Image: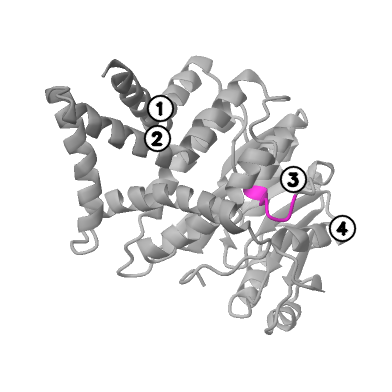
Amino acid sequence: MTLLAILFWLTCALIVWTQVGYRLALGVAARLRARAPRGATPARSGELPTLSLIVAAHDEQEVIADKVANALALDYPSELLEVIVACDGCADETAARARAAGADLVLELPRGGKIRAQDAAVAQARGEILSFSDANALWDADAARELVGAFGDREVGYACGQVTFTAPDGATNQEGVYWSYEMGLRELESRLSSITAGNGAIYATRRDSYIVVDPIMGHDLSLPFNTVKEGLRAVYVPTAVAREKMVPSLEGEFERKRRMMSHTWPILLRGGMLSMVGYPPGYALMIISHRLLRYSTPGLHLIALASNVALVALGGGLVYAVTLILQLTLLAGAALAGAVPLRPLLIARYYVLTTASSAAGLWDWLRHGTSASWEVAEGTR
């Protein structure tokens, strides 16, 4: 029973650390450092670099014209801004509508996946700073200036902005709750060292910091840690804001995250993220806490539940009965949310489904690999 108890409390501690304790520790560390947040610096017109905004698109005819119009309306000198749409095997009117909307360069490429479309665009881009966005993400007018401002610090090689989600009426997805918490984590990571992940809606790199990665390994995870390994910083710029539609249902969010995790596990296990060579000590702890343990949470929960059941069966006492009830209550709340869509139950369901998506993505990758191509998430256009 002693070994079971150690296993149970250790897995519980790891879950609590990655979900709650890590955030609290970052907050304490940030207070002790007692320095202003490190991120964007003001970018005056006379100091602005040339900027290429690259949009990789696959069959995005419904939104691409609005995206190009949004890019051209940014508060950034037109002579310094280049808008590139890289069409990844589009079978619809994406390319024609992008040209009609005023994109500076439209590439019509064979289907090779998002990463290879971005690589092709980078090869033809003229900007000193390379920025990237999704076809359904609309930037605030000042977002480009705010994002570029981060590169006023020569130590910065990568910067990502803040993505906010709009939800249709009747949406059950609780992604907004998670994303608010995640953005708080990134702001603290950025203040203390570097972020451990970005997002596809709004990010940028210096031209000489751009890295060509395996096409199944997305930029969101690959670029930040590789930037750190190159001796530069990857920062979060909360004032650079992009907006996009949220997947409306929790079930749809599960499928979206499952696909994402099938791309994440290769990065974690064979893409170099877990190699601590080149990481400052603090950043290594961030990778372990925010990435390795977070993605391992499904296994930790299963171990905690199984060991808890065994301890109760062996007469472990009241404490283990209470912890088992708490675990079963979380699962029951998640199951009940399907019939009773109350906010606390929906949050429980979101947590259970998104946690399970990590395991499902691992299973998909191990079973049949991961395709470099991608499909539009339902309800986000």
How far, Cα to Cα, is label 3 from label 4? 14 Å
Label 3 packing within 10 angstroms: few (<14), some (14-19), many (20+)? many
Q: Position of residue 181 (x, y in %)?
A: 41, 41
How far, Cα to Cα, is label 1 from label 3? 33 Å
- Mark 1 in CB contact with mark 2 (< 8 angstroms): yes
- Residue at image position (49%, 40%) is 295
Q: What residue type is labelled 1?
A: Leu
Q: Where is residue 78 in the image (x, y as percent from the top left)?
A: 78, 63
Please tell me whether mark 3 or mark 2 is closer to you in this view. 2
The residue singled out by tag 1 in the image is 14
The residue singled out by tag 4 in the image is 123
- Mark 4 in CB contact with mark 1 (< 8 angstroms): no
The residue singled out by tag 3 in the image is 205
Magenta range: 214-220
Please tell me whether mark 1 or mark 3 is closer to you in this view. 1
Q: Indicate which disc, 3 or 2, sits on the residue closer to the N terminus.
A: 3
Q: Which amino acid does label 3 sit on?
A: Thr
Vertical placement of 265 versus 280: above or below? below
Vertical placement of 186 versus 220: above or below? above
Q: Where is residue 215 in the image (x, y as percent from the top left)?
A: 73, 55
Q: What residue type is labelled 2?
A: Leu
Query: Which quarter of the rendered picture does the N terminus lie within?
Result: top left
